[in-house]
């Protein structure tokens, strides 16, 4: 098998870090590692490291070319259903490692919604079964870099992969230490202010809602967030739902907004009396505009606020909000983070290098 752009020793180090620090794999654990064509070398490294730890790995494999051949032949119902033997394996698993597949996300998102919904019809049941089994899981962004997606994002795939490798190996302990003072401040405060020298000066409201610290530890027993049993890696963010009625001022982004298969740059959000009154981008803002028009009631209300903690990221696709010191402001639905806005619209902008104050006190952001 070809080494590719990442050495086998690097893959082994990453697998060791995830299995030891994030998933706490022990001797006797039954470990499932998903593999697709583009992630098979990573899956091999995870299987080997699991065995070194006395665990029992199982690697189900999906071939990219064969998958798309089945899609072209209209076999959506077969692809979107899981056999009893797979459910049985999941009920016996202790640990689950997921890496994105299929690899060609651009092709996937070009499918009509009806077809993609059928392809992933198994998803709700998967979370139910995994939740009952108490699975400790991780979803790794290392499976996302793919040639078509790198071209869509305008990034170098090797550099993208390198950032993800280094960021994934930042330990939960280090991220939790950085998160602790931010969680306290955002959980107790009432008034949030973000400002910088480039035009950002935005006041937002806090309602002492629960603050989520995403530090790379799965939460299989969390009944309120089914996705918590698959911790996202790399990790590193503190998030809280905002007061949906409070927002005044301007937020100027200096990081790219990476969508599923496209991007937008140069976002500027303007709020007045709790509503988004203007949003524009330097380039590629069409997706935001299109989805905003269809967003319904609540699309223009502040959603949630986050602060990034991971020192190994810089304007990295799909995890741009995790960069240390980066702040994200969203508009639209915020149910996922404990808010009350049910709008299906979700739009965001990210700023690195801003000053953040809670009730007049500056937060200790790591740059």
Image (spheres, rainbow, N blue to C red):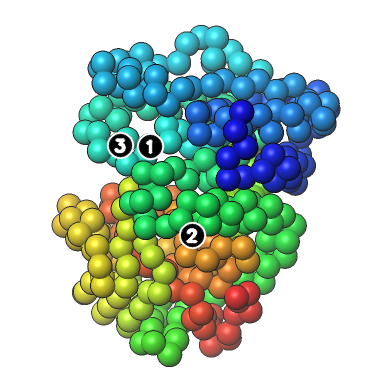
Residue at left 48%, top 37%? 100
Residue 301 in the image, given as x and y percentages of width and height: 29, 65
The label shown at residue 104 is: 1
**In the visual, does 133 lie left or right of 197?**
right
Instruction: Measuring from the top left, give residue 131's x and y in whole percent.
Output: 58, 30
Disc 2 target residue: 316
- The residue pinned by badge 3 equals 107
Tell me the quadrant of the picture where the C terminus can be found.
bottom right
Residue at mark 2 to residue at mark 1: CA–CA distance: 18 Å
Q: Residues within 10 Å of mark 2 (few under 14, many from 20)?
A: many
Circles 2 and 1 in contact, beta carbons < 8 Å: no
**First along the sequence among labels 3 and 2:** 3
Q: Are there few (<14), some (14-19), or many (20+) residues within 10 Å of tag 3?
A: few
User: In the current view of this chain or complex, which residue is farthest to the bottom?
Assistant: 197
Q: Helix, strand, or loop for circle 2?
A: loop
- In the picture, residue 273 is in which quadrant? bottom left
Residue 68 in view of the camera: yes
Quarter residue 318 falls in: bottom left
In the image, what residue occupies the spot 52% across and 66% down? 314
Q: Residue furthest front?
A: 2
The residue positioned 32% from the left and 83% from the top of the image is 249
Tell me the element at label 1. Answer: loop
Residue 135 showing in the rendered view: no
């Amino acid at each position: 098998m070809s080494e590719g752009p990442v050495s086998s020793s690097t893959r082994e180090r990453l697998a060791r870090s995830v299995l030891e620090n994030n998933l706490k794999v022990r001797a006797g654990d039954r470990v499932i590692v998903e593999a697709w064509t583009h992630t098979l070398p990573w899956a091999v490294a995870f299987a080997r490291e699991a065995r070194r730890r006395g665990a029992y790995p199982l690697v189900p494999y999906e071939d990219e070319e064969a998958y798309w051949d089945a899609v072209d032949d209209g076999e959506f119902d077969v692809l979107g259903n899981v056999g009893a033997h797979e459910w049985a394996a999941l009920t016996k698993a202790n640990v689950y490692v997921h890496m994105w597949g299929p690899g060609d996300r651009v092709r996937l998102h070009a499918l009509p919604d009806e077809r993609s919904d059928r392809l992933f019809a198994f998803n709700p049941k998967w979370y139910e079964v995994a939740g009952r089994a108490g699975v400790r899981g991780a979803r790794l962004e290392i499976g996302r870099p793919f040639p078509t997606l790198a071209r869509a994002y305008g990034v170098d795939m090797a550099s993208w992969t390198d950032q993800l490798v280094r960021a994934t190996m930042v330990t939960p302990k280090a991220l939790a230490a950085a998160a602790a003072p931010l969680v306290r401040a955002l959980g107790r405060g009432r008034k949030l202010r973000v400002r910088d020298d480039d035009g950002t000066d935005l006041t937002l409201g806090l309602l002492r809602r629960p603050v989520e610290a995403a530090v790379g530890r799965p939460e299989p027993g969390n009944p309120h967030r089914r996705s918590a049993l698959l911790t996202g890696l790399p990790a590193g963010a503190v998030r809280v739902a905002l007061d949906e009625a409070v927002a005044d001022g301007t937020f100027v982004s200096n990081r790219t907004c990476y969508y599923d298969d496209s991007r937008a740059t140069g976002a500027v959000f303007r709020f007045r009396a709790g509503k988004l009154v203007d949003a524009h981008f330097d380039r590629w803002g069409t997706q935001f505009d299109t989805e905003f028009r269809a967003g319904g009631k609540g699309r223009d209300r502040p959603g949630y606020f986050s602060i990034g903690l991971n020192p190994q990221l810089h304007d990295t696709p799909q995890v741009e909000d995790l960069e240390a010191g980066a702040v994200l402001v969203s508009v639209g639905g915020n149910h996922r983070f404990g808010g009350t806005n049910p709008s299906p619209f979700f739009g965001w902008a990210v700023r690195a290098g801003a000053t953040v104050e809670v009730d007049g006190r500056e937060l200790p952001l790591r740059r």
